[in-house]
Image (tube, grey):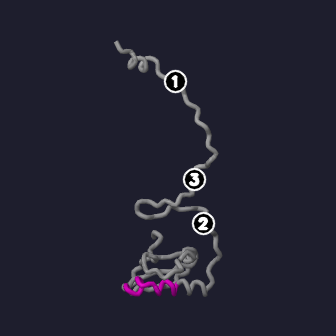
Amino acid sequence: MNIKGMISNILPNNEVRNVERIGQAIKSDQTNDRDANGQETYSGNQEQREPMTEEQLEKAMEHLRSLPAMKEHKWTVELDADEKGRFVVVKDNLGAVIRRIPELELWTLPSDNSPRGQLLKRSA
């Protein structure tokens, strides 16, 4: 009679291994991962920047107007200011709003002249 298989059922192994602590913190809040749909997770510790000057705002709007996709689709760029702040509104040729970009996101506009995927880089 083979009793090896029966002993584990009768006398379970109660030994618990000690786990050594590793001095590294979990970096779950500092990840650069994206969701399946391409959205980046919100990070509450974003850089605080001062509001753009009129000159900087106009330069950012000109950069948007000069993008090939804007010219191809005949989209327009307008400035919208309200109590929440200043926004750049991108509208199509029929006047429907495509994207409303906050002033703080205009700081991160790419400086290169690559025509691919720059307008809708961040999720709306």
The residue stretch that appears in magenta:
61-73
Q: Is residue 61 visible?
A: yes
Residue at screen point 54% across, 80% down: 111
Judged from this view, the residue extending furthest toward the top is: 1
Residue where numbered disc 1 is placed = 14
Q: Secondary structure at mark 1?
A: loop
Q: Secondary structure at mark 2?
A: loop
- Indicate left or right for 24 with 65 as reference: right
Task: State the image coordinates of residue 15 (x, y, percent, origin top left).
Answer: 54, 25
For badge 1, the amino acid type reads Asn
Q: Is residue 16 magenta?
A: no
Residue where numbered disc 2 is placed = 46
Q: Is residue 82 visible?
A: no
Please identify the dominant SS of the magenta region.
helix
Task: State the image coordinates of residue 46 (x, y, percent, origin top left).
Answer: 60, 66
For badge 3, the amino acid type reads Lys
Q: Are marks 3 and 2 in contact (CB under 8 Å)?
A: no
Indicate the quadrant containing the C terminus: top left, top right, bottom left or bottom right.
bottom left
Badge 3 crowding class, 10 Å Cα cut-off, few under 14, some 14 to 19, many 20 or more, is few
Q: Closer to the N terminus: mark 3 or mark 1? A: 1
Task: State the image coordinates of residue 9 (x, y, percent, origin top left).
Answer: 41, 20
Task: State the image coordinates of residue 35 (x, y, percent, origin top left).
Answer: 44, 60
